[in-house]
Image: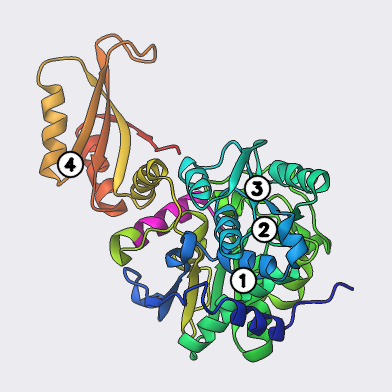
Amino acid sequence: MTPLVTVDQVRDAEKLLSNVARETPIEPARGLPQRYGDVRYKCENLQRAGAYKVRGAYVRISNLTPAERDQGVVAASAGNHAQGVAVAAAELGAKATVFMPTSAPLPKIAATRGYGAHVELFGETVDDALVEARAYAERTGAVFIHPFDHADVIAGQGTVGLEILRQAPDVRTIVAGVGGGGLISGIAVVARSLRPDVRVIGVQAEGAAAFPPSLAAGRPVRLEQYSTLADGIRVGIPGELTFPHVRDLVDDVVTVSDEDISRAMLTLLERNKLVVEPAGAVGAAAVQSGLIPTDGPVVAVLSGGNIDPLLLLRVIEHGLAAAGRFQRFTVTCSDRPGVLASILGLIAERGGNVIDVLHQRSDPHLRVGEVSVALSVETRGEDHAEHLMGALRDSGYRIHPGRTVL
């Protein structure tokens, strides 16, 4: 049997990190209905390098021998682990090489280079980059720093759990995102050892949820395909070490959709003034989706804040659409003077704000004498949007709802 990480290892890791990682704040969640109860956010998006990953990376590299550090380190990551390794290696005087998939966000690539690491782009997924990083380690003697599947990494990430128990001693449930499982494993080690009454719940993006089928099979199972906007947890198979930690110590693993994630990011930005990347928002998304027990304080870990501004713009629009506050739809109407003005006037009378209009006469599905009008409209929510489109239907217009696709 694979030995699990102990709470003493996590405490040792915390000593190593005392002058490296900051103790990030816990903030009350705002913008949630009262039925959710007492929800708080552990803001690892405010950590050095923008994510919790620096904790595990620093502990792993600091425990290398001087000779091993002289050989350099190598890692693979979509971004946050890359930046954590780059920062940790610079602090400890080791040369770092990081393999990142070609799909990695440009700001994460630039930040990793900015922290002093040499970046190589390889493959389409993190798994592709992992294979190449291991091959590089064999060729050069550099030490491979796994993003989640090593005891030192799990111990480092577990320091998040120690901080939560100190900062929120009344906590009843801890929620954290899950990719490979390093963060949730470390938190669960701490909770099971020090507060066995605390529930630990992991959250995966439903488009890249490898743990549910793996737990059902009793072993790590690789997904045949996986896709999600949460690139930081887009991992196709649990780790050999993290799997038994999750199986034995974590109470539940739930999944959220990309729509859930975008809604949560919008709430975090709009109501809590927190910039959080998709992978970092899955815990908040699970809370907002009603998947988390509310019988006592809940602490959801916001694991990272490194997001491409262009993606943030798209997610904001997507989140508004998912929340019913941004509507795309097409109105089919007769092609005669004044009809477009009537449609726009009806929308304005009912409090909608038209963002853009596309007038189309060449659609082959139109009848003779008809025109289609594609509209983007801001509304006050789902009820308001339905009221507005109902009014258009009652006025005799044919409505074809559309949706924003990321």
Residue 153 seen in this snapshot = no
Residue name at image x 13 percent, y 37 percent: 346
Question: CB of mark 2 within 8 Å of CB of mark 3?
Answer: no
Foreground pick, 92 / 46: 92
Vertical relation: 380 (above or below) 273: above
Spatial CA distance of label 4 from label 2 is: 46 Å
Spatial CA distance of label 1 from label 2 is: 11 Å
Spatial CA distance of label 3 from label 4 is: 50 Å
What secondary structure do most residues of the magenta stretch adopt? Answer: helix
For badge 2, the amino acid type reads Pro
For badge 4, the amino acid type reads Asn
The residue beneath circle 2 is: 147
The residue beneath circle 4 is: 353
Question: CB of mark 3 within 8 Å of CB of mark 1?
Answer: no
Of marks 3 and 4, which one's residue comes earlier in the chain? 3
Residue name at image x 57 percent, y 59 percent: 90
For badge 1, the amino acid type reads Gln
The residue beneath circle 3 is: 97
Q: Residues within 10 Å of mark 4 (few under 14, many from 20)?
A: some
Q: Nearer the viewer, mark 4 or mark 1?
A: 1
Q: Residues within 10 Å of mark 2 (few under 14, many from 20)?
A: many
Spatial CA distance of label 2 from label 3 is: 14 Å
Q: Nearer the viewer, mark 3 or mark 1?
A: 3
Numbered range of the magenta stretch = 256-268
Q: Which mark is residue 312?
A: none
Of marks 4 and 1, which one's residue comes earlier in the chain? 1
For badge 3, the amino acid type reads Thr
Q: Nearer the viewer, mark 4 or mark 2?
A: 2
Of marks 1 and 2, which one's residue comes earlier in the chain? 2
Query: Secondary structure under badge 3?
Result: strand
